[in-house]
Image: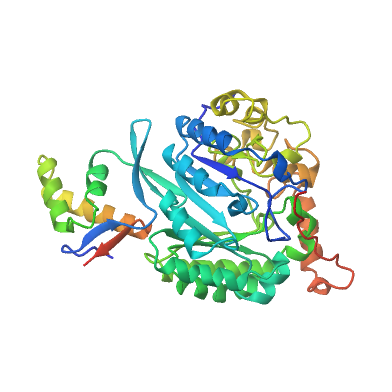
Amino acid sequence: MTSARTNPLALIAELTHRCPLHCVYCSNPLELRSRANELDTQTWSRVFREAAELGVLQADFTGGEPLARTDILELVRAARTAGLYINLITSGLPLDEARLDALLAAGLDHLQLSFQGAREEIAAEISGTKSHAQKLRVLEWLKSRRVAVTLNFVIHRRNIDQLAEMLALAESSSATRVEFAHVQYYGWAFANRERLLPTREQVAHSIEFFKRAQQRLSGKIRIEYVVPDYYAKYPKPCMGGWGRKLMLITPTGEALPCHAAQIIPELHFENVRDRDLREIWENSAAFQKFRGEAWMQEPCKTCDRREQDFGGCRCQALLLTGDASATDPVCSLAPTRGNVDAILEALNAPSAAEPTLTTPAWLYRLNPA
Amino acid sequence: MTPDANSKPRLAPGCRLSENNQQRVLLMPERALRLNGPSLEIVQRCDGQHTVRQIITDLQQIYSKAEPKKVETDILGYLTLLHDQRALDFDA
Protein backbone atom coordinates (compact mmCIF):
# COMPACT_ATOMS: atom_id res chain seq x y z
CA MET A 1 0.00 0.00 0.00
CA THR A 2 0.98 3.63 -0.40
CA SER A 3 0.99 5.46 2.91
CA ALA A 4 -1.02 8.66 3.32
CA ARG A 5 0.53 11.41 1.23
CA THR A 6 2.07 14.32 3.09
CA ASN A 7 2.88 17.84 1.93
CA PRO A 8 6.47 18.73 1.16
CA LEU A 9 7.82 21.12 3.82
CA ALA A 10 10.91 22.34 2.04
CA LEU A 11 11.87 23.02 -1.56
CA ILE A 12 15.55 22.64 -2.37
CA ALA A 13 16.17 25.06 -5.21
CA GLU A 14 19.43 24.23 -7.00
CA LEU A 15 19.55 27.53 -8.82
CA THR A 16 22.70 26.78 -10.81
CA HIS A 17 25.55 24.30 -11.05
CA ARG A 18 28.03 27.12 -11.64
CA CYS A 19 30.39 27.56 -8.68
CA PRO A 20 33.75 29.21 -7.99
CA LEU A 21 34.68 26.21 -5.80
CA HIS A 22 35.59 22.70 -6.95
CA CYS A 23 34.96 20.69 -3.79
CA VAL A 24 35.91 17.05 -4.02
CA TYR A 25 32.68 15.98 -2.28
CA CYS A 26 30.21 18.23 -4.11
CA SER A 27 26.63 16.89 -3.94
CA ASN A 28 25.90 17.96 -7.52
CA PRO A 29 25.73 15.16 -10.09
CA LEU A 30 28.82 14.26 -12.11
CA GLU A 31 26.92 15.45 -15.17
CA LEU A 32 26.55 19.20 -14.57
CA ARG A 33 23.96 21.40 -16.31
CA SER A 34 25.10 24.37 -18.34
CA ARG A 35 24.05 27.98 -17.80
CA ALA A 36 22.27 28.12 -21.16
CA ASN A 37 19.73 25.54 -19.99
CA GLU A 38 19.01 27.03 -16.55
CA LEU A 39 15.44 27.96 -15.58
CA ASP A 40 14.68 31.66 -16.00
CA THR A 41 13.46 34.09 -13.32
CA GLN A 42 9.79 33.75 -14.28
CA THR A 43 9.78 29.98 -14.12
CA TRP A 44 11.45 29.92 -10.70
CA SER A 45 8.96 32.53 -9.47
CA ARG A 46 6.06 30.34 -10.59
CA VAL A 47 7.67 27.31 -8.91
CA PHE A 48 7.89 29.24 -5.60
CA ARG A 49 4.19 30.15 -5.78
CA GLU A 50 3.21 26.57 -6.59
CA ALA A 51 5.39 25.32 -3.74
CA ALA A 52 3.74 27.62 -1.19
CA GLU A 53 0.30 26.50 -2.40
CA LEU A 54 1.42 22.91 -1.92
CA GLY A 55 2.24 23.61 1.74
CA VAL A 56 6.00 24.18 1.43
CA LEU A 57 7.26 26.49 4.20
CA GLN A 58 10.92 26.88 3.39
CA ALA A 59 13.07 27.31 0.30
CA ASP A 60 16.73 26.31 0.39
CA PHE A 61 18.57 28.35 -2.22
CA THR A 62 21.59 26.32 -3.15
CA GLY A 63 23.66 25.32 -6.17
CA GLY A 64 26.43 25.31 -7.20
CA GLU A 65 26.83 28.80 -5.87
CA PRO A 66 23.37 30.41 -5.85
CA LEU A 67 24.93 33.89 -5.90
CA ALA A 68 26.26 33.09 -9.37
CA ARG A 69 22.71 33.89 -10.54
CA THR A 70 22.60 37.55 -11.57
CA ASP A 71 18.85 37.56 -10.76
CA ILE A 72 19.35 36.32 -7.19
CA LEU A 73 17.69 39.39 -5.64
CA GLU A 74 14.61 38.93 -7.82
CA LEU A 75 14.48 35.25 -6.87
CA VAL A 76 14.69 36.04 -3.14
CA ARG A 77 11.91 38.61 -3.52
CA ALA A 78 9.74 36.20 -5.52
CA ALA A 79 10.10 33.40 -2.98
CA ARG A 80 9.47 35.76 -0.10
CA THR A 81 6.39 37.22 -1.82
CA ALA A 82 5.11 33.67 -2.30
CA GLY A 83 5.32 33.29 1.50
CA LEU A 84 8.40 31.10 1.80
CA TYR A 85 11.18 31.27 4.40
CA ILE A 86 14.48 31.70 2.60
CA ASN A 87 17.68 29.86 3.44
CA LEU A 88 20.70 30.72 1.32
CA ILE A 89 23.56 28.22 1.25
CA THR A 90 26.63 29.96 -0.07
CA SER A 91 30.41 29.82 -0.29
CA GLY A 92 30.40 33.57 0.41
CA LEU A 93 32.79 34.16 -2.46
CA PRO A 94 30.59 36.41 -4.62
CA LEU A 95 29.57 38.55 -1.61
CA ASP A 96 30.45 42.09 -0.65
CA GLU A 97 28.77 44.23 1.99
CA ALA A 98 26.47 45.99 -0.46
CA ARG A 99 25.26 42.73 -1.97
CA LEU A 100 24.72 41.26 1.49
CA ASP A 101 22.58 44.25 2.47
CA ALA A 102 20.61 43.97 -0.75
CA LEU A 103 19.90 40.28 -0.05
CA LEU A 104 18.68 41.09 3.45
CA ALA A 105 16.50 43.91 2.16
CA ALA A 106 15.03 41.50 -0.43
CA GLY A 107 13.92 39.20 2.39
CA LEU A 108 16.67 36.67 3.04
CA ASP A 109 15.96 34.98 6.41
CA HIS A 110 18.92 32.71 7.00
CA LEU A 111 22.41 32.61 5.59
CA GLN A 112 24.38 29.39 5.71
CA LEU A 113 28.07 29.89 5.07
CA SER A 114 29.89 26.76 3.95
CA PHE A 115 33.40 26.07 5.24
CA GLN A 116 35.87 23.50 3.94
CA GLY A 117 37.88 23.59 7.15
CA ALA A 118 39.16 25.89 9.89
CA ARG A 119 42.34 26.83 8.02
CA GLU A 120 43.25 28.11 4.58
CA GLU A 121 45.54 25.19 3.75
CA ILE A 122 43.00 22.36 4.04
CA ALA A 123 40.19 24.53 2.65
CA ALA A 124 42.26 25.25 -0.45
CA GLU A 125 43.12 21.60 -0.95
CA ILE A 126 39.49 20.50 -0.68
CA SER A 127 37.89 23.28 -2.73
CA GLY A 128 40.65 23.74 -5.29
CA THR A 129 40.44 27.51 -4.67
CA LYS A 130 41.60 30.13 -2.19
CA SER A 131 38.42 31.17 -0.44
CA HIS A 132 38.94 30.89 3.31
CA ALA A 133 40.00 34.50 3.94
CA GLN A 134 36.89 35.79 2.14
CA LYS A 135 34.69 33.56 4.34
CA LEU A 136 36.27 35.11 7.43
CA ARG A 137 35.46 38.57 6.04
CA VAL A 138 31.83 37.55 5.49
CA LEU A 139 31.63 36.38 9.12
CA GLU A 140 32.75 39.85 10.25
CA TRP A 141 30.12 41.59 8.07
CA LEU A 142 27.41 39.31 9.47
CA LYS A 143 28.13 40.35 13.06
CA SER A 144 26.51 43.74 12.63
CA ARG A 145 23.48 42.52 10.64
CA ARG A 146 20.17 41.07 11.73
CA VAL A 147 19.97 37.66 10.03
CA ALA A 148 20.15 34.06 11.21
CA VAL A 149 23.57 32.55 10.53
CA THR A 150 24.62 28.91 10.28
CA LEU A 151 28.15 27.72 9.68
CA ASN A 152 28.23 24.54 7.59
CA PHE A 153 31.32 22.39 7.98
CA VAL A 154 31.59 19.35 5.77
CA ILE A 155 33.59 16.72 7.65
CA HIS A 156 35.88 13.98 6.31
CA ARG A 157 39.14 12.24 7.14
CA ARG A 158 41.35 15.22 6.29
CA ASN A 159 39.63 17.71 8.61
CA ILE A 160 37.92 15.59 11.27
CA ASP A 161 40.86 16.17 13.64
CA GLN A 162 40.31 19.97 13.48
CA LEU A 163 36.80 20.06 14.98
CA ALA A 164 37.85 22.14 18.00
CA GLU A 165 39.21 24.89 15.71
CA MET A 166 36.03 24.87 13.65
CA LEU A 167 33.89 25.19 16.76
CA ALA A 168 36.06 28.05 18.04
CA LEU A 169 35.53 29.83 14.73
CA ALA A 170 31.76 29.41 15.13
CA GLU A 171 31.87 30.68 18.72
CA SER A 172 33.70 33.81 17.63
CA SER A 173 30.99 34.53 15.03
CA SER A 174 27.33 35.55 15.23
CA ALA A 175 26.15 32.06 14.26
CA THR A 176 23.35 30.54 16.34
CA ARG A 177 23.63 27.23 14.54
CA VAL A 178 26.48 25.02 13.32
CA GLU A 179 26.21 21.98 11.12
CA PHE A 180 28.97 19.40 11.16
CA ALA A 181 27.81 17.22 8.32
CA HIS A 182 29.95 14.32 7.33
CA VAL A 183 30.41 13.81 3.61
CA GLN A 184 27.76 11.58 2.10
CA TYR A 185 29.10 9.21 -0.50
CA TYR A 186 27.38 9.96 -3.79
CA GLY A 187 28.59 11.64 -6.96
CA TRP A 188 31.93 13.42 -6.55
CA ALA A 189 32.30 12.18 -2.97
CA PHE A 190 31.76 8.58 -4.05
CA ALA A 191 34.56 9.01 -6.57
CA ASN A 192 36.84 10.37 -3.82
CA ARG A 193 35.65 8.08 -1.04
CA GLU A 194 38.95 6.33 -0.46
CA ARG A 195 40.55 9.60 0.65
CA LEU A 196 37.52 11.04 2.46
CA LEU A 197 36.20 8.24 4.64
CA PRO A 198 37.48 8.60 8.23
CA THR A 199 38.66 5.76 10.45
CA ARG A 200 36.44 4.14 13.07
CA GLU A 201 38.51 5.76 15.82
CA GLN A 202 38.14 9.24 14.31
CA VAL A 203 34.38 8.82 14.10
CA ALA A 204 34.13 7.69 17.74
CA HIS A 205 36.21 10.71 18.89
CA SER A 206 34.09 13.09 16.85
CA ILE A 207 30.83 11.84 18.36
CA GLU A 208 32.20 12.43 21.86
CA PHE A 209 33.30 15.90 20.81
CA PHE A 210 29.88 16.81 19.38
CA LYS A 211 28.04 15.60 22.48
CA ARG A 212 30.24 17.65 24.81
CA ALA A 213 29.91 20.71 22.57
CA GLN A 214 26.11 20.41 22.49
CA GLN A 215 26.02 20.34 26.28
CA ARG A 216 28.40 23.23 26.77
CA LEU A 217 26.76 25.52 24.21
CA SER A 218 23.12 24.70 24.94
CA GLY A 219 21.04 27.89 24.60
CA LYS A 220 23.87 29.66 22.72
CA ILE A 221 24.59 27.69 19.57
CA ARG A 222 22.57 24.80 18.22
CA ILE A 223 24.95 22.09 17.09
CA GLU A 224 23.78 19.51 14.59
CA TYR A 225 25.97 16.70 13.38
CA VAL A 226 25.76 13.93 10.85
CA VAL A 227 28.14 10.99 11.14
CA PRO A 228 29.15 8.82 8.18
CA ASP A 229 26.42 6.23 7.86
CA TYR A 230 28.88 3.55 6.71
CA TYR A 231 29.70 3.26 10.44
CA ALA A 232 26.06 3.29 11.57
CA LYS A 233 24.02 0.37 12.86
CA TYR A 234 20.86 1.53 11.13
CA PRO A 235 20.42 3.65 8.00
CA LYS A 236 19.49 7.32 7.96
CA PRO A 237 15.88 8.22 7.14
CA CYS A 238 17.11 9.62 3.84
CA MET A 239 15.35 12.94 2.99
CA GLY A 240 12.82 12.08 5.72
CA GLY A 241 11.47 9.36 3.45
CA TRP A 242 11.16 9.33 -0.36
CA GLY A 243 8.59 11.90 -1.49
CA ARG A 244 7.48 12.67 2.07
CA LYS A 245 8.99 16.03 3.07
CA LEU A 246 11.34 17.38 0.45
CA MET A 247 11.44 18.21 -3.20
CA LEU A 248 14.52 19.25 -5.13
CA ILE A 249 14.48 21.23 -8.36
CA THR A 250 17.61 21.04 -10.52
CA PRO A 251 18.98 24.12 -12.33
CA THR A 252 17.26 22.92 -15.49
CA GLY A 253 13.92 22.15 -13.86
CA GLU A 254 13.79 18.42 -13.15
CA ALA A 255 11.90 17.69 -9.92
CA LEU A 256 13.74 15.11 -7.81
CA PRO A 257 13.02 13.39 -4.49
CA CYS A 258 16.73 13.78 -3.53
CA HIS A 259 20.06 15.19 -4.73
CA ALA A 260 21.33 11.98 -6.27
CA ALA A 261 18.12 10.40 -7.60
CA GLN A 262 19.14 10.81 -11.24
CA ILE A 263 21.62 7.96 -10.86
CA ILE A 264 18.71 5.50 -10.58
CA PRO A 265 18.40 4.33 -14.18
CA GLU A 266 14.76 3.23 -14.25
CA LEU A 267 13.35 6.60 -13.12
CA HIS A 268 12.04 9.36 -15.34
CA PHE A 269 11.80 12.82 -13.79
CA GLU A 270 9.17 15.37 -14.71
CA ASN A 271 10.23 18.96 -15.41
CA VAL A 272 8.63 22.02 -13.81
CA ARG A 273 8.59 23.65 -17.27
CA ASP A 274 5.93 21.11 -18.31
CA ARG A 275 4.06 20.27 -15.12
CA ASP A 276 2.58 21.93 -12.06
CA LEU A 277 4.47 21.16 -8.84
CA ARG A 278 1.42 19.59 -7.17
CA GLU A 279 0.88 17.29 -10.13
CA ILE A 280 4.53 16.17 -9.95
CA TRP A 281 4.47 15.70 -6.18
CA GLU A 282 1.22 13.78 -6.08
CA ASN A 283 1.23 11.73 -9.25
CA SER A 284 4.62 11.48 -10.96
CA ALA A 285 6.00 7.97 -11.25
CA ALA A 286 9.37 9.03 -9.82
CA PHE A 287 7.87 10.39 -6.59
CA GLN A 288 5.55 7.36 -6.26
CA LYS A 289 8.29 4.83 -6.91
CA PHE A 290 9.68 4.52 -3.35
CA ARG A 291 6.92 6.29 -1.46
CA GLY A 292 5.29 4.26 1.31
CA GLU A 293 6.19 0.60 1.79
CA ALA A 294 4.93 -1.37 -1.21
CA TRP A 295 8.36 -1.36 -2.89
CA MET A 296 10.21 -2.74 0.13
CA GLN A 297 12.06 -6.05 0.20
CA GLU A 298 12.85 -8.15 3.25
CA PRO A 299 14.10 -7.41 5.85
CA CYS A 300 12.58 -3.87 5.53
CA LYS A 301 9.12 -5.13 4.58
CA THR A 302 8.42 -6.55 8.05
CA CYS A 303 10.94 -4.52 10.08
CA ASP A 304 9.76 -2.55 13.13
CA ARG A 305 12.00 0.35 12.09
CA ARG A 306 10.52 0.80 8.58
CA GLU A 307 8.48 3.85 9.65
CA GLN A 308 11.57 5.46 11.21
CA ASP A 309 14.16 5.06 8.48
CA PHE A 310 11.96 4.19 5.45
CA GLY A 311 14.49 1.57 4.35
CA GLY A 312 17.34 4.09 4.25
CA CYS A 313 18.77 5.58 1.09
CA ARG A 314 17.77 4.33 -2.38
CA CYS A 315 20.80 5.83 -4.10
CA GLN A 316 23.17 4.20 -1.64
CA ALA A 317 21.41 0.87 -2.17
CA LEU A 318 21.99 1.24 -5.89
CA LEU A 319 25.63 2.33 -5.56
CA LEU A 320 26.62 -0.44 -3.14
CA THR A 321 24.37 -3.36 -4.17
CA GLY A 322 23.32 -2.57 -7.74
CA ASP A 323 19.63 -2.65 -6.72
CA ALA A 324 17.85 0.59 -5.82
CA SER A 325 15.05 -1.35 -4.08
CA ALA A 326 17.36 -3.24 -1.73
CA THR A 327 17.64 -2.48 1.97
CA ASP A 328 20.26 0.26 2.46
CA PRO A 329 23.43 -1.85 2.87
CA VAL A 330 24.69 0.23 5.81
CA CYS A 331 21.89 -1.38 7.87
CA SER A 332 23.22 -4.11 10.18
CA LEU A 333 20.14 -6.16 9.21
CA ALA A 334 20.80 -5.89 5.47
CA PRO A 335 21.96 -9.08 3.72
CA THR A 336 24.51 -6.91 1.86
CA ARG A 337 26.04 -5.26 4.95
CA GLY A 338 29.20 -7.22 4.10
CA ASN A 339 29.78 -4.88 1.13
CA VAL A 340 30.13 -1.95 3.53
CA ASP A 341 32.15 -3.90 6.10
CA ALA A 342 34.67 -4.83 3.42
CA ILE A 343 35.21 -1.13 2.63
CA LEU A 344 35.65 -0.30 6.32
CA GLU A 345 37.98 -3.23 7.00
CA ALA A 346 40.31 -2.19 4.19
CA LEU A 347 40.37 1.37 5.52
CA ASN A 348 40.81 0.48 9.19
CA ALA A 349 43.53 -2.14 8.66
CA PRO A 350 46.72 -1.02 10.50
CA SER A 351 48.64 -0.85 7.22
CA ALA A 352 46.07 1.47 5.62
CA ALA A 353 46.25 4.37 8.03
CA GLU A 354 47.33 7.07 5.57
CA PRO A 355 46.85 7.45 1.82
CA THR A 356 49.88 6.23 -0.06
CA LEU A 357 51.31 6.90 -3.47
CA THR A 358 48.92 4.35 -4.92
CA THR A 359 45.87 6.14 -3.56
CA PRO A 360 44.15 7.91 -6.45
CA ALA A 361 44.49 11.69 -6.50
CA TRP A 362 41.51 13.96 -5.82
CA LEU A 363 38.90 14.19 -8.50
CA TYR A 364 37.94 17.86 -8.41
CA ARG A 365 34.42 18.94 -9.31
CA LEU A 366 34.42 20.68 -12.66
CA ASN A 367 32.36 23.60 -13.81
CA PRO A 368 29.51 23.19 -16.29
CA ALA A 369 30.08 24.24 -19.87
CA MET B 1 17.77 28.67 32.25
CA THR B 2 14.50 30.17 33.51
CA PRO B 3 13.68 33.54 31.95
CA ASP B 4 13.73 36.62 34.18
CA ALA B 5 10.20 37.99 34.82
CA ASN B 6 11.32 41.51 33.87
CA SER B 7 13.09 40.56 30.64
CA LYS B 8 11.46 41.15 27.29
CA PRO B 9 11.54 38.17 24.93
CA ARG B 10 11.97 38.92 21.26
CA LEU B 11 12.13 36.59 18.26
CA ALA B 12 15.76 35.98 17.31
CA PRO B 13 17.09 37.02 13.89
CA GLY B 14 15.79 34.69 11.21
CA CYS B 15 12.72 33.70 13.24
CA ARG B 16 9.30 35.01 12.26
CA LEU B 17 5.59 34.31 12.40
CA SER B 18 3.95 33.25 9.19
CA GLU B 19 0.85 31.56 7.88
CA ASN B 20 0.33 28.70 5.48
CA ASN B 21 -3.07 27.22 4.61
CA GLN B 22 -4.74 28.92 7.59
CA GLN B 23 -2.14 27.48 9.95
CA ARG B 24 0.03 29.93 11.90
CA VAL B 25 3.67 28.82 12.05
CA LEU B 26 6.89 30.05 13.61
CA LEU B 27 9.55 29.83 10.92
CA MET B 28 13.20 29.51 11.91
CA PRO B 29 16.41 28.15 10.39
CA GLU B 30 15.70 24.69 8.99
CA ARG B 31 12.55 24.18 11.03
CA ALA B 32 9.02 25.35 11.68
CA LEU B 33 6.67 25.11 14.66
CA ARG B 34 2.91 24.98 14.27
CA LEU B 35 1.27 27.43 16.67
CA ASN B 36 -2.19 27.03 18.15
CA GLY B 37 -4.04 28.63 21.05
CA PRO B 38 -1.68 29.37 23.94
CA SER B 39 1.56 28.88 21.94
CA LEU B 40 0.37 31.45 19.40
CA GLU B 41 -0.71 33.87 22.16
CA ILE B 42 2.76 33.59 23.70
CA VAL B 43 4.79 33.96 20.49
CA GLN B 44 2.70 36.96 19.35
CA ARG B 45 3.81 38.73 22.52
CA CYS B 46 7.52 37.96 22.03
CA ASP B 47 8.01 41.37 20.41
CA GLY B 48 10.62 42.98 22.64
CA GLN B 49 7.85 45.09 24.22
CA HIS B 50 6.07 42.69 26.59
CA THR B 51 7.89 41.50 29.70
CA VAL B 52 7.69 37.85 30.70
CA ARG B 53 5.49 38.95 33.61
CA GLN B 54 3.08 40.76 31.27
CA ILE B 55 2.82 37.70 29.03
CA ILE B 56 1.97 35.59 32.07
CA THR B 57 -0.67 38.07 33.27
CA ASP B 58 -2.22 38.31 29.79
CA LEU B 59 -2.52 34.57 29.40
CA GLN B 60 -3.84 34.09 32.90
CA GLN B 61 -6.67 36.44 31.89
CA ILE B 62 -7.28 34.74 28.52
CA TYR B 63 -7.23 31.29 30.12
CA SER B 64 -8.97 32.32 33.33
CA LYS B 65 -10.43 28.86 33.89
CA ALA B 66 -6.96 27.34 34.18
CA GLU B 67 -4.97 27.27 37.42
CA PRO B 68 -2.85 30.52 37.31
CA LYS B 69 0.28 28.81 38.67
CA LYS B 70 -0.01 26.13 35.97
CA VAL B 71 -0.30 28.81 33.27
CA GLU B 72 2.86 30.47 34.58
CA THR B 73 4.81 27.20 34.69
CA ASP B 74 3.71 26.30 31.17
CA ILE B 75 4.71 29.70 29.78
CA LEU B 76 8.14 29.62 31.42
CA GLY B 77 8.64 26.12 30.07
CA TYR B 78 7.66 27.16 26.56
CA LEU B 79 9.88 30.27 26.59
CA THR B 80 12.80 28.15 27.78
CA LEU B 81 12.17 25.66 24.98
CA LEU B 82 12.12 28.43 22.36
CA HIS B 83 15.29 29.90 23.82
CA ASP B 84 17.05 26.53 23.68
CA GLN B 85 16.03 26.31 20.01
CA ARG B 86 17.65 29.75 19.58
CA ALA B 87 14.33 31.23 18.51
CA LEU B 88 14.25 33.85 21.31
CA ASP B 89 16.50 36.53 22.72
CA PHE B 90 15.73 38.20 26.04
CA ASP B 91 16.18 41.97 26.17
CA ALA B 92 16.87 43.44 29.59
Question: How many numbered marks, from 0 up?
Answer: 0
Q: Position of residue A275 (x, y in %)?
A: 61, 25
Question: Is residue A83 visible in this depiction of the protein?
Answer: no
Q: Nearer the viewer, residue A89 or A9?
A: A89
Residue located 24% across and 58% down the image: B9
**Left or right: A352 as drawn, with respect to A1:** right
Q: Residue A269 or A251: which is nearer the viewer?
A: A251
Which of B92/A128 is in front? A128
Q: Residue A123 lies in what quarter of the image?
A: bottom right
The quadrant holding residue A219 is bottom left
Q: Residue visible at 34% across and 58% down?
A: B12
Identified at 51% across, 74% down, the residue is A169
Quadrant occupied by the N terminus of chain A: top right
* Whether residue A37 can be seen here: yes
Residue occupying the point 26% across, 43% down: B40
Q: Nearer the viewer, residue A300 or B63?
A: B63
| Apparent side of residue A19 relative to residue A206 in the rendered image (left or right) | right
Where residue A2 appears, as percent x and y from the top left, is 58, 25
Residue A83 screen position, x and y as percent:
41, 38
Colour convention = rainbow
Image-quadrant location for residue B76: bottom left
**Residue A229 in the image: above or below residue B41:** below
Residue A97 place in picture, x, y as percent:
48, 64
Classify residue A121 as left or right of residue A175: right
